[in-house]
Amino acid sequence: MSQDIAMGGQADHTGHEAHEHHGPPSGIMRWITTTNHKDIGSMYLWFSFIMFLVGGAMAMVIRAELFEPGLQIVSPEFFNELITLHALIMVFGAIMPAFVGFSNWMIPLMIGASDMAFARMNNWSFWLLPVASGLLILSMFVPGGAPGTGWTLYPPLSIQMGMGMDLAIFGIHLLGMSSIMGGINIITTILNMRAPGMTLMKMPMFCWTWLITAFLLIAAMPVLAGAVTMLLTDRHFGTTFFNAAGGGDPVLFQHIFWFFGHPEVYIIALPAFGVISQVIPTFSRKPIFGYASMVYAIAAIAITSFFVWAHHMYVTGIPLNGQLYFMYATMIIAVPTGVKVFNWVATMWKGSLSFETPMLFALGFLFLFTLGGFSGLVLSLTAVDVMLQETYYVIAHFHYVMVAGAVFSAYAGAYYWLPKWTGHMYDETLGKWHFWLTLFFFNMTFFVQHFLGLAGMPRRVPDYALQFAEFNKISSIGAFGLGISQLLFLYVVLKALKSGKKVDAKVWDGAQGLEWTVPSPAPYHTFETPPVIEEGKH
Amino acid sequence: MRVSMKRLAVVSALVAPLFPFSNAWADYQFNMHVPVTEAGRRAYTLHNDISLICLGIFILVFGVLIYSLLHHRKSKDHAPADFHEHLGVEIAWTIVPTIILVLMAIPATRTLVEMKDTSEAQLTIKATGYQWKWGYDYLKGEGEGIKFLSVQTTTPDQIDGKAEKPATYMETVDNPLVVPVNTKVRILTTANDVIHSWAVPAFAVKQDAIPGFIRDTWFRADQEGTYIGQCSELCGKGHGYMPIVVNVVSAADYTTWVEAQKKKAAAGDDPNKVWSMDEAVARGEKVYNANCAVCHQANGKGVPGTFPALDGSKIAGVASASAKAKHIDTVLHGRPGTPMAAFGPQLSDTDIATVITYERNSWGNKTGDVIQPADIAAARK
């Protein structure tokens, strides 16, 4: 059935142009009309990297302003716009699309399906993204500028903003639609299109993480859409959801936002776990340890993520019982997360390890994400959080989770599958340089921010007291290095495309799974007849 | 603490070359400052303890990993084992962390319960967040009835680098909060416009100030001194520039301060005084720089597209009765839906009258209008 949809889409194009039957239409129309999961996956990945550079450029301006005390480069209101857009673009434009790109490319290849279940909707999911990101960026150029509220968009501050806020709200609506459609597509594909014999508990871990993430997307994104719609009506249609003068409550928005916001953290983290769970066994030449407990841990993390939202709101004045409950619930998340880390370590234990670039990024992920987990545990204790909430400690914490977690994992996945996508090997030496530079500058940028936060420097300020000057300078220099190092990745990819060594179907000697049974580069159509799954293999 | 100072100095000397931008090691603060309240010190200890536990687990787990990375290498011809599950180990590493977490939760709960107990306060002060300053009302206890605004005194020239930054850059206000030492002070927080957050790290206190609602927190400082905090919830362009300065003084000094404040209040402005143009403009300029210049700028030009110019505006720059009435109305009641706050509840009739006079007769504005406090009192009705 789903195969018919995919093939039907293809027939439409070839009907208009007398092209060979299984080839794509040429030129720009190939990309606009494509329903092919590989094309769409590639577009997601390129889009994500472009947005990564845009959001990164904003971060460079932020760090340049914070290089020393005083205001040198930007005005405080523009600084606030930058921190808002940096976050929204990185979360919704860079990190999420990167993992959706992986899912598009790899899930059908991993489960032996010919394409995604809803191939046309897949196209639509992607093409909403540039429009949504365009609205976000456009908001900088309208009177009043982009929202200067931080990505959390808290009212009443967001009520004061100019029309840039409305553009951002519509942008978020579109991003939500794109994510929900993507989520539906992934769930349908995984539940209905696995090759015969591929039971759920034989699926690669990456598919499991995405199956669970897709449910999180469908549950969480409408909540965000609701929250920003209420903002919109408060702004323009006289409602008072968040205005005490009309019987509303500004804190209500925070509850709704974080009910979305905390699962969002795992929407980003779980696919990252999935990539790591593919890379580590390959370069350990040993099956993943505790497959079943990994699946249960992912499910446990996903479910728990809906019950901890108010740990972002300890200082809003929630009652003691609420603080205690959210503290305990948050601490509990450390257990399944710990299980995953232990499982990865046990996978490597007594393996036959080698350290190609994907493995290096996976190990970098493991070390730094665990540090981010520990600072998260520190923040979960309400009494300590009161001192650290809204300081640079929080910034350091979530960049360890988001950058060292998600971005390192995305790089691991990109290096791991790049030869499969392109048929060409990347330059291993340059890849390793990219890793070590990123690792060094990442820590230079963000590790010192722990100290800034502990000393009491608030976040989201364009200027600071002299006592914070030294660490800020170190952090800014690190940030510039981190930013420049990422251009190296672009060079590595382009070089691989142009002159990389040709690779076989099975690129990595330790790799397991269906994606390594198709030629490299993967042909435009794969698994038009489902493969046969051997007994007893994941 | 003190015992380890010598060791810290040795370590510092060894690590210092890694931090090239400092002339004094003291500039690098690696941990929290030790709070000056009992509850704060407990939270501080809790933080240190949990950080150490995390460090221990980190060393343990990654010690195993690093051993594996060194010895189980393909380059050393290590043949891969093929085990992939072990029920006992998996149960153990679920249960042991749970036990550690429960042990952590016990002191964390105890500390939190203590921190949340705002009962039996000896002094109650309301802190109101405004864009972008704090207002304090002494509601109960010694000094009841004192109220004032607290605005930062860092100048635009210092911020823009046209004047040298003092050591206390961004950490000074015109009227600091003054409280007695060893006294349980309850702080009620609220806000006038958007959400702010009243925070002083030395007291381990941070409480959002939410418009339309009252929240509370408390502290009992046991060391005299000046303690600095900053607004800790993004509240617009001036968010970085609304510090919180608290002077903790002895009981005797506090009583002296209260007396001085009361005398100052009694000798306040005469609401029936008739102001001359020069007097009003001089007074109004001070009020303008403290309250208005952050958005409308000292030169009255505003920020195009964001904050309207007053210089040459249709309201402030036109000499007509309707423009004058509109001007008074805007300052008193604000413009809902924009950052323009209602200054009626914040400023006295005299302040509002003189600042409007200043705005109508400065830069290119030459209306010749002199607004009297009585005009404002009438407009308030």
Image (cartoon, coloured by chain):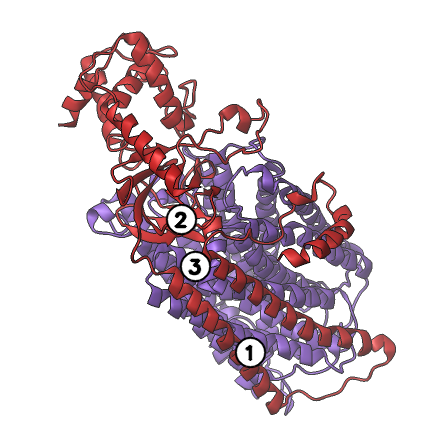
Residue at mark 1: B97
Examine the rendered structure and indicate whether residue A415 appears above or below residue B65.
Answer: above
Examine the rendered structure and indicate whether residue A338 appears above or below residue A309.
Answer: below
* Horizontal arrangement in the rendering, residue B29 relative to residue B128 (left or right): right
Element class at badge 1: helix
Where residue A186 sits in the image (x, y, percent)?
49, 71
Tell me if mark 1 has few (under 14), some (14-19) or many (20+) residues whose alpha carbon lies within 10 angstroms of its own. Answer: some
Q: B322 or B42, which lies in front? A: B42
Q: Quadrant of residue B84?
A: bottom right
Element class at badge 2: loop
Specify the colour of chain A: purple
Question: Which tag is nearer the camera, tag 3 or tag 1?
Answer: 1
Say which amino acid is labelled 3: His
Q: Is residue A37 something that shows in the picture? A: no
Mark-to-mark CA distance, 2 and 3:
14 Å
**Identity of the residue drawn at 82% across and 63% down:** A501
Q: B338 or B265, which lies in front? A: B265
Q: Chain of mark 1?
A: B
Examine the rendered structure and indicate whether residue A430 appears above or below residue A350.
Answer: above
Q: Chain of mark 2?
A: A
Say which amino acid is labelled 1: Pro
Where residue A393 sits in the image (x, y, percent)?
55, 54
User: In the image, which disc is placed on residue A153?
Assistant: 2
**Which of the two labelled residues, at mark 2 and mark 3, occupies the earlier sequence position?**
2
Residue at mark 3: A312
Specify the colour of chain B: red
Element class at badge 3: helix
